[in-house]
Amino acid sequence: MPEIVVGAGRIRLVQGDIVQAKTDAIVNAANASLAGGGGVDGAIHRAAGPELYELTRPFGGCATGSAVITGAGRIPLPTRFIVHAVGPRYSTARDAECAALLRSAHEVSLRLCEEKAVESVAFPAISTGVYGFPIARAAPIALQAAMEHLKAGERSVKRVVFVLFTPADLQVFSEALASLGQG
Ligand code: AR6
């Protein structure tokens, strides 16, 4: 299981269903309306139950590149929070802008976790499904955001887990982690 130590924390990569992550917080790859959808969003809403819609409704949506945090509905402890992060829809023509938005979706998610004194958080590969972000391009952006957050020190977040849905996605993240770890 790939894992690296960063400052006082660690980043781990696993393959599986993020609903089973058993972290204090789980990040959802949401959309700007926060009204639910397919992919990981659908899986999280199914597990959390209809109350999750009640929890997101007051926000009235979320900008791309940002995130909001709610309770976890029916997802059992230790998970207490869902972070609804909105990654960009990828377009080659706007690659740099998409990269910045993906990075900020991770940064805001981690900042919200700090506000709630979260120690462990699980991320999916945001934007790499329906939103079409090439995963080999997304992986180092996501990992770097997590590494920089942990490196800053004095963080409540000590463990960042990336839960990749397929073995192929896990492989891509593992290679990105290995090259960043050496850098
Ligand atoms: N656990 C972990 N990863 C998952 C799971 C799961 N249960 N299910 C899918 N993935 P996507 P996006 C992976 O499409 O690209 C929704 O409709 C999937 O293989 O869920 O950010 C929202 O409402 C992929 O690697 O999210 C938005 O409208 C990754 O999660 C839109 O899709 C992200 O794929 C967001 O698109």
Image (spheres, grey):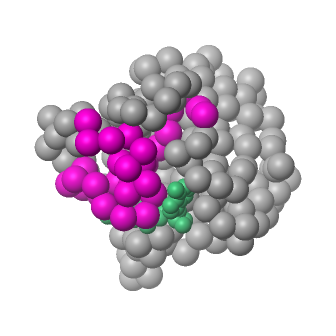
Determine whether, in the image, residue 165 is placed left or right of residue 178.
left
- Magenta run includes residue 25: yes
Q: Between residue 39 and residue 131, name the one nearer to us.
A: 39
Can residue 119 be seen here?
Answer: yes
In this rendering, position of residue 105 left or right of residue 10: left
Residue in the foreground of this view, choosing between 60 and 105: 60
Looking at the rendering, which quadrant does residue 84 occupy?
top left
Q: Position of residue 56 (x, y in %)?
A: 23, 39
The residue positioned 42% from the left and 45% from the top of the image is: 47
**Residue 146 x %, y %:** 61, 42
- At a point 72% along the width and 28% down the height, the residue shown is 9
Q: How many discs appear? A: 0
Q: Is residue 86 left or right of residue 174?
A: left
x 50%, y 68%: residue: 128
* Magenta residues (range): 22-51
Quadrant position of residue 108: top left
Determine which quarter of the picture holds residue 24. Answer: top right
Q: Which of the pair 32/39 is nearer the observer?
A: 39
**Can residue 111 be seen?**
no
Could you say where residue 162 lies in the image, as x and y percent from the top left? Answer: 63, 49
